[in-house]
Amino acid sequence: MNYRQSCLPVFVIAAALASPAAAQDDEDAGSIIVTAQRDNATEVVNGGEAGVLGDQPAEDLPFSIRSFDETLIYNQQPLTIGEVLENDPTVRLTYGFGNAAEQFVIRGFSLFGDDVGVNGLYGIAPRQLIAPELFEEVQVLNGATAFLNGAAPGGSAVGGGVNLQLKRAGEDFTRATATFVGESHLGGSFDVSRRFGEGGEWGMRVNGAYRDGEVAIEREDRRTQVLGGSLDYDGGPLRAALDLAYQEVGVDSLRPKVTLLSNAIPDVPDASANYAQDYTYTELTDIFGTLSLEYDIAPDILAYAKVGARRGDEEGIYGGIQVSDAETGEATSGFHSFIPYEQDNEAVEAGIRASFATGAISHTLNVGGNLIWQQDRTAYDFFNPFDTNLYDPVQVAPQDTAFVGGDLDDPFPITERKLQSIFASDTIGLWDDRVLLTGGARLQRINVKVFSYFGGALDTEFDEEALTPVAGLVVKPVEGLSLYANYIEALQEGPRATDVQFSNFGTTLAPRRSTQYEVGGKLYFDPAIFATLALYRIERPGTGAVDDGAGGLRFAYIGEQTNEGVELTLNGELAPGLRLITGFAFADAEFDSGLDAPGVPEFAANANVEWDLPFVPGLTLTGRVTHTGEQEANVANTLQLDSWTVLDLGARYVFAAGDAPVTLRLTVDNVTDEAYWASAFDAFNTALLQGAPRTVRASASIAF
């Protein structure tokens, strides 16, 4: 389908709304346009949820943190949270193996979708793909977070974390939007916010979206439907919020990652080419929510509690392609698979924050604890491989079964996790809080039970404790400047010996502790500019084979991976109507052997610009440049990916339809239709992810 034809429904709606604007009083219409254009401005919130330290402005924290708000989601029409995070120069996107599971690379380490937080709780977010329409903020905290958030149940979050804030009622509004993306991906959404009660103490927000159709990649069809609701109360000392959400996502013929079996990088196929099998699909259904309570025991003493739960149901036929000849594209399918997956998660956190002074020294004390329960039920059916070609893929029916594990019709538990912790910290303020010193620790216990796919009997159990400290310093020598330093750790479930050659086959190592050292500074000044500079070093133990003392080999921690880097982010309004979100990241991820970690670019940079044209009321021009430098493609460092740069251009226009503002948006991502290998980050294989082709996005929205 031609995209100009596909955009027609979006702009027919806009045209129908435009005629009343001609009769609108010029002065009133001008005021509506100015207000709506200002409300549509894409911006970054400099601060966010810092785990047990609470919601804080960035300048008061000894960490690097920023939040992308819902205006960016409306303006850019991202299909997933990963597309939101493409605006961050310190984050790069990749996929899991064979399926539609986004992973985020922060400071050279992966963050799994399992370990994305919702309203400050782990285990509540949908596991593989997350639709952005439900959220009002996407918060990024760079660096290890074991003290702030606890150990991530999925075993990632070494280099940073992401927290999603579900939408809650603010000002009263009603908004309806029609959207188009790619080839024929059409959709619509609504968002209603109301506050009521004598003092507006009650709030309700309901939002939903549905979209379906082929995206810019040939034959890749995506379908998403979401519904979210929030009820909150803010009256006197008590604040409460109930957030509930439903998400259903389907992907047909997902373009997979390309696994390399030869020591060469194949030429990149056409930008929109798809080498997936038509029978591959992903179906994801999630119901999740949180209940948050806060009570002011006294003016400076806050008690809080949060509980959350999620039920996730997944199934799909997943597949990849394994290239054996880079020149000709000759390949095999590898083992495609049918995998059902069910997950039940619950999480609870409670604590007290108290502020007091001892003479001229202020204190903010945090004490509390948390619990996370998870149960994974799954099975697998792997199919025999077949021959194909990267540049001329063949379409076949699913092949015969090669091997099966578990109950495909009614999966039984394969993994059960219980993570629990208690924490305490004190932030000491000196010289009118121009110096803030934070110290604390979290005692954590990780219990993991692994059951056999063949009968469901308990296979192994892992139960370990670890103490993870934190130390942070903020110094504000002059107004508008904040210098900081931190020491913090990451804590992961220990890796398991999965190779039968090891004498300790089947055992799980103690929790893997990584250490981070970071220094930096934050500069903030009028009209609204905020810059953050961070220098960091993260050390994570490696694993391998060691002599077991009896003539055999034992799986153990050995060696170390060290990631060092420099990050600079800058955002704000450079001049009236001219806004910028930009930054860069240098990274050096290296093993003890001197080899670089694959999939970690040495340099990455973004620049996102918006300009409200002063001579055309209501018109805003937009542009974004994304650059990723060279990266190693395999552990031996014999293969490298070239650097790549893509350019996105767009515009939006606001006009008045009666008393209602209407916003039209049009963006073209990857304007030049560059074909490129975007990432080589993969935990298990030498595998490449191809970047997205030219993608047209259009929308029309009206607010009442």
Image (spheres, rainbow, N blue to C red):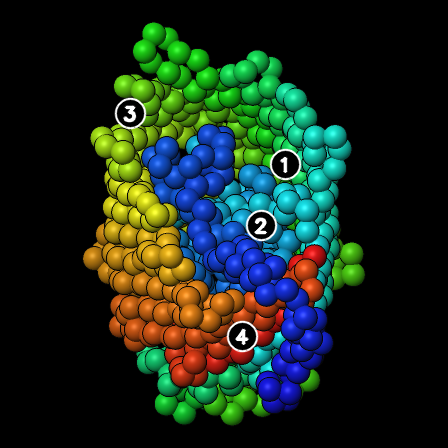
Nearer mark to the viewer, of 2 and 4: 4
Instruction: Please tell me how many numbered marks the rendered image carries.
Output: 4
Residue kind at label 4, given as amino acid type: Leu
| Comes first in the chain, label 4 or label 1 | 1
Contact? badges 3 and 2 (CB < 8 Å): no
Residue kind at label 1, given as amino acid type: Ala
Along the line of sight, which residue is nearer the eye, 346 or 179? 179
Q: Quadrant of residue 201?
A: top right
Residue 699: x percent and y percent? 61, 71
Along the line of sight, which residue is nearer the eye, 560 or 5? 5
**Which residue is at a point 45% across and 87% down the rendered structure image?**
270
Contact? badges 4 and 1 (CB < 8 Å): no
Q: Is residue 55 rendered to the left or right of residue 20?
A: left
Q: Vertically, is 623 above or below 523?
A: below
Q: Vertically, is 671 above or below 284?
A: below
| Comes first in the chain, label 3 or label 2 | 2
Q: Residue furthest top?
A: 359
